[in-house]
Amino acid sequence: MHLIGFSGALTVDLVLGIMGSGGSVIAIPIFAYLFHISPVTTTAYSLFVVGTSASVGAFRNWKAGLVDFRIAFVFAIPAFIAIYVVRKYALPIIPTELMVFKGFVVTKDMAIMVLLAILMLFSAISMLQKDKLSTKSPLSNPYNYPLMIFQGIFIGLLTGIVGIGGGFLIIPTLVVLAKLPMKKAVATSMFVIAMKSLIGFMGDLGNLEINWSFLGAFTLISVLGTYLGIYLSTYINSAQLKKFFGWMVLIIAIGILYKEVLT
């Protein structure tokens, strides 16, 4: 199972390197179900792995001049604050048992995994649909800064709870509200994911016991996967990969819901 799990580490960031998002929704089930790590710790590990690996892609995108730092910081600073507050102060005070309904106990761990599965379903649906986002945008349209700030806070809170990068939420926001072309939106999203995830992980330090040797090995394999994904991105049909990955995420999401709710 551990061999399968480390093989999954390559998959996590192979996808991230090619698509600019999506890696963390695979990382969390790998940590939780293959390595049997508690969901709260799993979300912390996911933030570190995806944040570190996304930094590789963000650096390459920066060198290529694809990252819009002005938009990134307008959107990301509220997200940074929100995710840090969630990880540092909110998650530790949430009780282990949230509620009991007719003998069915809803725990914090279960709620995190179910929320993750719901987000995965939305992510899968968005990937399976035809891309309707414009790759070009008129420069005359003003940026919607207030809504971008609100979206940053919302995505920071949401991804802080489940420990994902949230690229499938960030990219549409950057295209629609910041009027970025798709290529720049993907590149800027990877920068935001890197910074947001690593800052979120910092909020976990002192709250959780971190197995650094395990996390370091998993992260190293993931970074290699990111490099491989970036290299393969010039040869692979991204539209077909997106559809395949969408079906895979959909199946995993259904599996999580079945395991957490019905078993």
Image (spheres, grey):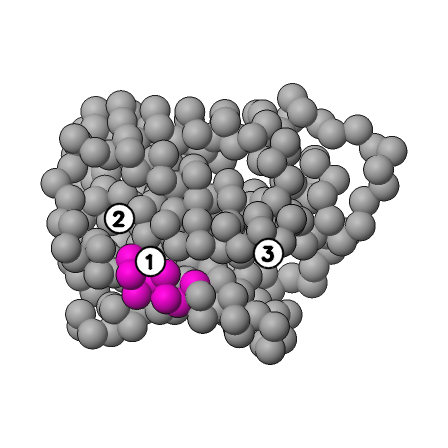
Q: Is residue 79 above or below residue 107?
A: above
Residue at the (69%, 52%) spot, across then down: 182
* Dot in front, 1 or 3: 1
Asked if disc 1 and disc 2 are in contact, CB closer than 8 Å, the reply is yes
User: Which corner quadrant of the image does residue 161 belong to?
Assistant: top left
Asked if disc 3 and disc 2 are in contact, CB closer than 8 Å, the reply is no
Q: Does residue 137 appear left or right of residue 28 in this picture? A: right
Q: Position of residue 93 (x, y in %)?
A: 21, 24
Which residue is the site of mark 1?
A: 27
Placement of the C terminus among the 4 image quadrants:
bottom left
Which residue is the site of mark 3?
A: 126
User: Which corner quadrant of the image does residue 215 belong to?
Assistant: bottom left
Residue at the (51%, 50%) spot, across then down: 58
- Of labels 1 and 3, earlier in sequence is 1
Identify the amino acid type marked 1.
Ala
Identify the amino acid type marked 2.
Tyr
Residue found at the far bottom of this picture: 235
Q: Does residue 171 appear left or right of residue 230 in this picture? A: right
> Residue 45: which disc?
2
Magenta residues, start to end = 219-226
Residue found at the far front of this picture: 63
Q: Residues within 10 Å of mark 3 (few under 14, many from 20)?
A: some
Q: How many marks?
A: 3
Distance between mark 1 and mark 2 Cα atoms: 9 Å
Q: Does residue 116 appear left or right of residue 246 in this picture? A: left
Instruction: Inspect the magenta stretch and tell me whether residue 225 lies in it.
Output: yes
Q: Is residue 259 visible?
A: no
Placement of the N terminus among the 4 image quadrants:
bottom left
SS assignment at label 1: helix
Closer to the camera in the image, 51 or 8: 51
- Magenta: main secondary structure: helix
Q: Position of residue 172 (x, y in %)?
A: 64, 45
